[in-house]
């Protein structure tokens, strides 16, 4: 979406990305590595691409193969199992192999700019490992922040002084090429980014914790930020620069941030493991949705995500698509793609 907006469609990007889906998709805590897939294709000794025919090894799950089937770009697997040194090696190999004209590090939301001790910070590991590795490679990397505040961790106001110039404001036309992907992909931050590019405004409640995220005119903007300044501000990124394992990264996160998000995933996975999955009863679900909407409306919430609805209704992650289909069939007027609109009181 952003690559097409900034560079056009002639040269297709290689997107180096984590296979780190939420537990609704992947019941195994933490990120997936190359050994967690079959059918990957070698690009360099440390970098593999994820084609549409690749498959995660059970019980792991991943959205990457389906993304590869629907997007024209090449998806390459970013593997943090060997810490920042391992990711740096991946980047260096890929840069030598591709000799790219430009390198962009994109973060949706802006928590990559966190110090590490903010009480609202929830998931710093992936961002800080990538930031630290990008600062180690001998190549110019442009850091871009899309949708300040949309990840529900640092607010747009918290980020304002750290943001550089606006390089683009996403529009409905920019979102159109990935519209089908957003119909099924569970990324809340990207979903809100697309919704605001289409004009949606209000307060969106997200994640299992029910974080309220403002959807404003600032939300579809993409800012450039100085990479070195981001590193100097990010205590965790500086602390993990020489790590060689993910365990080391976690240990530093516990020391700097007071937690490791993978610990949270481990604990939650144990709870979800015992969660039963039964066919949805339409009347029961719709009644529960009505109750949630009434309470959310009282909190000033105007929108939510299907992921959040799945969580608050205590449904199994595999039932997210069934819930979505039920609501779109029964109440299509509330769909503000790809979000769910909370109606006004009648």
Image: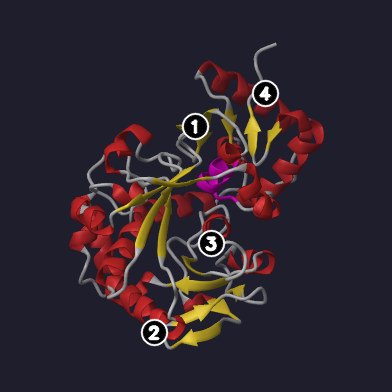
Relative placement, left or right, of 83 versus 93 is left
Q: Residue at x 40, y 79 (%)?
A: 95
Give the mark nearer the N terminus: 1 vs 2.
2
Q: Position of residue 26 (x, y in %)?
A: 54, 60
Q: Is residue 223 left or right of residue 176?
A: left
Circle 3 SS class: helix
| Label 2 residue SS | helix
In magenta, the rendered stretch is 186-194
Between marks 4 and 3, how big is the CA–CA gap?
44 Å
How far apart marks 1 and 3 lie (CA) works out to 23 Å
User: Could you classify mark 4 by the number of other residues whose Cα lies within 10 Å: few (under 14), some (14-19), or many (20 or more)?
Assistant: some
Q: Which mark is residue 290?
A: 4
In the rendered image of this protein, does residue 326 appear above or below residue 275? above
Looking at the rendered structure, the secondary structure element under dot 4 is: helix
Give percent across and percent down for residue 103.
41, 67
Please give the residue where the numbered disc 1 appears in the rendered image: 217
Q: Residue at x 52, y 50 (%)?
A: 272
Q: Are marks 4 and 3 in contact (CB under 8 Å)?
A: no
Q: CA distance from mark 4 to mark 1?
A: 29 Å
Q: Going from the N terminus, do you reach mark 2 or mark 3 first? A: 3
């Amino acid at each position: 979406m952003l690559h097409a907006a900034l560079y056009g469609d002639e040269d297709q990007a290689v997107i180096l990305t984590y296979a780190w889906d939420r537990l609704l998709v992947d019941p195994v805590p933490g990120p997936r590595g190359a050994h967690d897939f079959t059918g990957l294709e070698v690009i360099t000794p440390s970098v593999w691409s994820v084609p549409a025919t690749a498959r995660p090894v059970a019980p792991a799950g991943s959205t990457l193969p389906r993304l590869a089937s629907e997007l024209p770009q090449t998806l390459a697997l970013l593997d943090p199992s060997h810490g920042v040194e391992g990711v740096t090696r991946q980047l260096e190999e890929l840069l030598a192999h591709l000799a790219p004209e430009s390198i962009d590090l994109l973060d949706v939301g802006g928590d990559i700019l966190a110090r590490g001790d903010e009480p609202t910070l929830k998931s710093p590991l992936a961002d800080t490992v990538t930031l630290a590795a990008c600062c180690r490679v001998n190549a110019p990397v442009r850091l871009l922040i899309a949708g300040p505040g949309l990840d529900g961790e640092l607010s747009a106001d918290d980020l304002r002084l750290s943001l550089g110039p606006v390089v683009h404001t996403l529009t409905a036309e920019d979102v159109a090429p990935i519209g089908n992907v957003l119909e099924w992909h569970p990324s809340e931050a990207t979903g809100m980014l697309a919704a605001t590019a289409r004009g949606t405004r209000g307060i969106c409640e997200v994640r299992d914790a029910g974080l309220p995220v403002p959807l404003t005119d600032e939300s579809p903007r993409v800012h450039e930020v100085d990479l070195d300044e981001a590193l100097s501000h990010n205590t965790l990124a500086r602390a993990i620069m020489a790590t060689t394992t993910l365990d080391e990264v976690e240990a530093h996160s516990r020391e700097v941030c007071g937690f490791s998000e993978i610990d949270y995933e481990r604990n939650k996975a144990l709870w979800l493991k015992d969660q039963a999955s039964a066919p949805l009863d339409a009347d029961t679900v719709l009644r529960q949705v009505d109750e949630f909407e009434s309470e959310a409306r009282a909190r000033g919430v105007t929108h939510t995500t299907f992921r959040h609805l799945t969580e608050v209704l205590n449904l199994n992650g595999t039932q997210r698509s069934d819930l979505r289909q039920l609501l779109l069939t029964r109440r299509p007027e509330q769909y503000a793609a790809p979000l769910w609109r909370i109606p006004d009181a009648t």
